[in-house]
Amino acid sequence: QVVLVESGGGLAQAGGSLRLSCAASTRTLGIYAMAWFRQDPGKERDLVAALTRNDGHAYYADSVKGRFTISRDNANNTVHLQMNDLKPEDAAVYYCAATSAILRTAMVAFDPSRYPYWGQGTQVTVAS
C-alpha cells in the first residue's frame, strides 16, 4: 500500500508557473512508475505526464509537451510536476498516481486503470 499526498496547487495567471509535489509513503519510490493525471468535472481522468521506474523515461500528453516536466526525488520519496506557461485549459484537479507495473508503451502509461495508488488531488486554477 502506497499513500500519496499532493501539494502545490492553487491559482496562477495565464503564462505563469506552478510546481506540484507528490509525497509518497514508501521508502522505495524508485520501484514505482509515477504519473500525474488531471480531471475536469464530468470528464475522464487524463494523463498529463508519467515517469517509468527504471530508465526514467517520461511520457507527456501532447497538450503539455514543452511546458510541463515530471521529475522524481527518490531520496525524499517525492515526485514533482513543474508546470510553466500555464493556460486556462490547464485548470483541473491534478492527481498523483503510482504503479509497480512497467510502462512499456504510451498506451499503458496513459491508462489510469494501470495505477492502483492515487492521491486525493490538488486543484489548479488558471486565470486568463
Image (cartoon, rainbow, N blue to C red):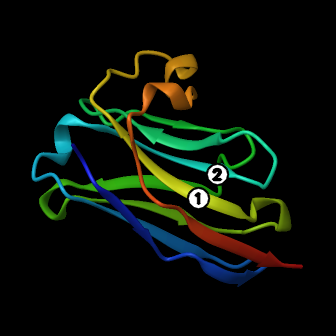
Residue type beneath disc 1: Tyr
With 60 as the anchor, is 115 left or right in this view?
left
Of 80 and 94, the residue lying toward us: 94
Determine crowd level at label 2: few under 14, some 14-19, many 20+ residues with C-alpha closer than 10 A.
many
With 100 as the anchor, is 43 left or right in this view?
right
Of 64 and 42, the residue lying toward us: 42
With 85 as the anchor, is 95 left or right in this view?
left
Classify the position of the C terminus by image quarter: bottom right
- Does the residue at mark 2 contact the one at mark 1 (Cβ under 8 Å)? yes
Q: Is residue 14 visible?
A: no
Residue 71 spot, x, y in % from top left: 37, 54
Residue occupied by mark 1: 94
Classify the position of the N terminus by image quarter: top left
Residue occupied by mark 2: 38
Residue type beneath disc 2: Arg
Mark sitting earlier along the chain (2/1): 2
Give the CA separation, mark 2 to mark 1.
Answer: 4 Å
